[in-house]
Amino acid sequence: MSWTREQRNVTIAAYLGWTLDAFDFFLMVFVLKDIATEFNTGIPAVALAVTLTLAMRPIGALIFGYLADRFGRRPTLMINVACFSLLEFASGFAPSLTALLVLRALFGVAMGGEWGVGSALTMETVPTRSRGLVSGILQAGYPSGYLLASVVFGVLYQHIGWRGMFMIGVLPALLVLYVRSNVPESPGWKQMAKRPRPSLMSTLKHNWKLSIYAVVLMTAFNFFSHGTQDMYPTFLREQHHFAPHMVTWISIALNLGAIAGGLAFGWGSEKIGRRRAIFIAALMALPVLPLWAFSSGAVALAIGAVLMQIFEQGAWSVIPVHLNEISPEEVRATFPGFVYQLGNLLASGNAALQAQIAVNHGGNYGLALALVTGIVAVVIAVLILFSPERRGIDMTRTSAGSAAAS
């Protein structure tokens, strides 16, 4: 099973796109406390910025997904990366909390487009039998971005402060040059562009049951990921009073676990099926809850965090390929990204919710983390049983080149 140079470049570009998108997003969660101090407010008020970013992502998924389905995956991906990089940079100059909230909302629009466009470009290009592994690679971009943000926080934060952290976030714009020089257009889009296609609304209306199901599923998945990640640095700093360098080391460890779990379950889904892989990963997160949220000491917390991310990202690693496989082909750049980001919208209150639960229980962030994560892990395990299984479908139909490559 050989890959062409173009297939490798597409995979690299999509992985880096999601990595750098997540990097820009997670820079924010490391400095919630510092922003609250500068603007003389509480952490829940600053956590609203995270909520706004997540809430605006469906708009970006619609805008950039439409552009990708209409004009191609490649040029849309370049525009998208440039937008979220520049908005991240601008966040470092926010003169007030209100201005920062506006900028993070706009960043959410830009962030919302990358995942759907990048995953469609990749899944329509790579060999069919490699999709499970590639799905794991793509979704590993999210913890990779978190890992990169952890390193930047640990190494540079004490020198550049929270504003400097955001300014570094402009660097992902360099990815545009790589995409322009090395990434071809999706063969699937080239074939579909030759045929008349129904509108997004008519397609969603025709597939309304699938659309509702996918949104509910992705709402649970987004509570799963953001429930285990967004407030975790604050949990370590506020409840356990760890210094920034210790938060960095634990964050690095948990993200390495997330990458390993994502690759393992993504690859495994090619063997045992998408639904079964997600079901197993979600349920395996449950016995980890006590160690992850209620233990004391850096070593025990780090072990719990690594195990939790292995299973949380293990379940998530199957989502890029699963959503693309069950998506109506006419709107493949729009549908997966839109239902994913609409789920983000419905789960966007997670950071503020967990922060408020913690405040209401005397600063017990561990309770807030465990409560949300335990519930949604069970919900995901139940919901995935009702999903269609379309592992290995032909995403290009008439694309002989792609079929031959698989």
Image: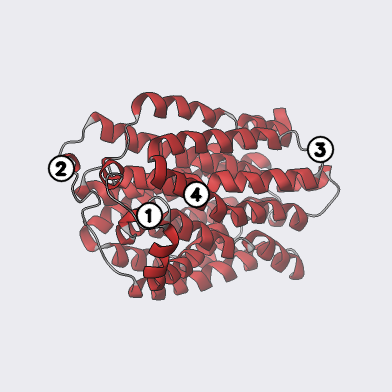
What's under tag 2, amino acid-wise? Ala
Picture coordinates of residue 196, whole percent (x, y): 31, 52
In terms of depth relative to the viewer, which is nearer, 41 or 337?
337
Pointer 2 residue = 400
Residue nearest the viewer, comparing 293 with 334? 334
Specify whether 86 is left or right of 256. right
Identify the secondary structure beneath mark 1: helix
Disc 1 and disc 2: Cα gap in Å? 21 Å
Of labels 3 and 2, earlier in sequence is: 3
Check disc 2: other Cα within 10 Å, few if <14, some if 14-19, many if 20+: few
**Camera-side residue of 236 and 103:** 103
Q: What's the amino acid at mark 3?
A: Pro
Task: State which mark lies toward you, 1 or 3.
Answer: 1
Q: Which label was assigned to residue 331?
A: 1
The chosen color scheme is secondary structure
Q: Secondary structure at mark 2?
A: helix
Spatial CA span between label 2 and label 4: 42 Å
Q: For the residues carrying marks 4 and 3, which lies nearer the camera in this image?
A: 3
Specify whether residue 34 is in view: no
Question: Which one is in front in this view, the residue at disc 2 or the one at disc 4?
Answer: 2
Amino acid type at circle 4 is: Leu
Q: Is residue 68 found left or right of 158 in the rendered image? A: left
Along the polypeptide, which appears first: circle 1 or circle 4? 4
User: How far separated are the C-alphas under marks 3 and 2?
Assistant: 54 Å
Q: Is 254 above or below relative to 371?
A: above
Image location (x, y in percent) of residue 159: 71, 27
Q: In this rendering, would 249 be left or right of 324?
A: right
